[in-house]
Image: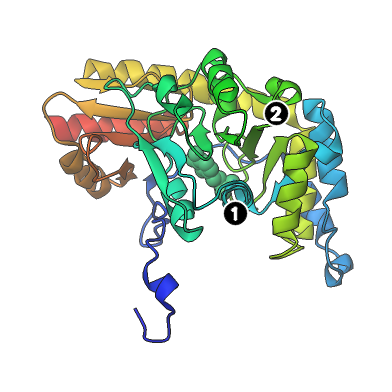
Amino acid sequence: MSNYWNSFTRKLDPYVPGEQPKDRKYVKLNTNENPYPPSANVLAAIKDAANDQLRLYPDPNCDELRGKIADHFQLDAEQVFIGNGSDEVLAFSFMTFFSPENPVAFADITYSFYKVYANLCSLSPKIIPLNNDFTLPADAFCEPNGGVVIPNPNAPTGRGLPIESIKYILNANKDQVVIIDEAYIDFGGSTAVPLIKDYPNLLVVRTLSKYSSLAGIRVGFALGQKDLINGLNTVKNSFNSYTIDRLAGAGAIAAIDDDAYYRDMAQKIIATRERTIMQLNAIGFSVIPSQSNFIFASHKTAAAEVIFHALREHGVLVRYFNQPRIDNYLRITIGTDEEMDKLMEALKDILK
Ligand SMILES: *Cc1c(COP(=O)(O)O)cnc(C)c1O
């Protein structure tokens, strides 16, 4: 910490991303990246966009990409907001919709960036403890609050939320915005997008990082009624008008066009997930039911922290959170079948 930092910065407690190691080659199951490559059309589109047009600023409104996304979800282009990764979309959403007078409600065990954004925006969080089985207590989100943010499926537990619970929460929060973060929705959850037409308070946030295998180009988006999207544009254009560069824009457009490729990859990941859960159960792990491309697992005798370090020694990276209630769990991203075989081999060696 430096004397040159202002008092606000000194009080920040930033997010710690999962590591991207450079020291050796790991089986990397720690940051929920997609193990399969982006579609060939996406790579071709990005290469094609690497031309002399790069001297020009990109389209600040991302009209072509917004149009594609709107068509894909059967919405209007005015109902789509694009950002530099969904993390940025979430940060703008916190700035746009939540106020310091009114605490924003989110779960105790959830995506840890929410607390960071609350802090960054000088908001007070209203922390709602999940039930013992990590299901979400919908009633608690219907008590007075200044806004709600829920990932569906939840991270890091992988549990999905039924659409009926989302409707229930939307109905009880008509005067404030409810953000549903659907980063992992395409791995088996049920999307809230069809509710947008009936709920002016609903904002659905998506990312191309997981399902579309494009964490490296940083594109996320929000879907909601026009009024919410206008608010996000007002904040974005008070910060940086060009959040999506030309290469990312071209890749994202091709990704939305090639949904068939990605649907197949997601099916493969789901099949690998179910196979991995059975194999983990057989060696003494219990696993929370997952609708995501990761699982949350706890062993009946061996401590998660010990397994975490031992896996690293074996060249396998997973995620461990040293925090109350979940400090005996490992979050394991679903890789290819071969990668999961390596994980199982390492675990059998560690547990014997
Ligand atoms: C990965 C993740 C994001 C962020 O995705 P980016 O688009 O890569 O910024 C947002 N929300 C949740 C719950 C995530 O797990």
Q: Is mark 2 within 8 Å of ligand 1?
A: no
Picture residue at 83% right of the left edge, 61% below the top? 58
**Residue 299: which disc?**
none
Residue 171 visible in the picture? yes
**Residue type, mark 2 in image:** Tyr
For this rendering, which residue is in front, 251 or 155? 155
Residue 252 visible in the picture? no
Figure quadrant of the N terminus: bottom left
**Residue 95: which disc?**
1
Q: Residues within 10 Å of mark 1 (few under 14, many from 20)?
A: many
Tell me which corner region of the image, top left, top right, bottom left or bottom right, holds residue 283. Answer: top left
Callout 1 secondary element: helix
Residue assigned mark 2: 261
- What is the distance, in whole Å, between disc 2 and disc 1 at their CAs? 35 Å
First of labels 2, 1 by sequence position: 1
Above or below residue 287? Residue 70 is below
Residue 28: % across, % down? 41, 44
Residue 154: % across, % down? 45, 30
Residue 346: % across, % down? 25, 35
**Residue type, mark 1 in image:** Met
| Left or right relative to 242: residue 292 | left
Number of marks: 2
| Left or right relative to 182: residue 258 | right
Q: How is the image coloured?
A: rainbow
Figure quadrant of the C terminus: top left
Above or below residue 307? Residue 298 is above
Mark whose residue sits in front, 2 or 1 = 1
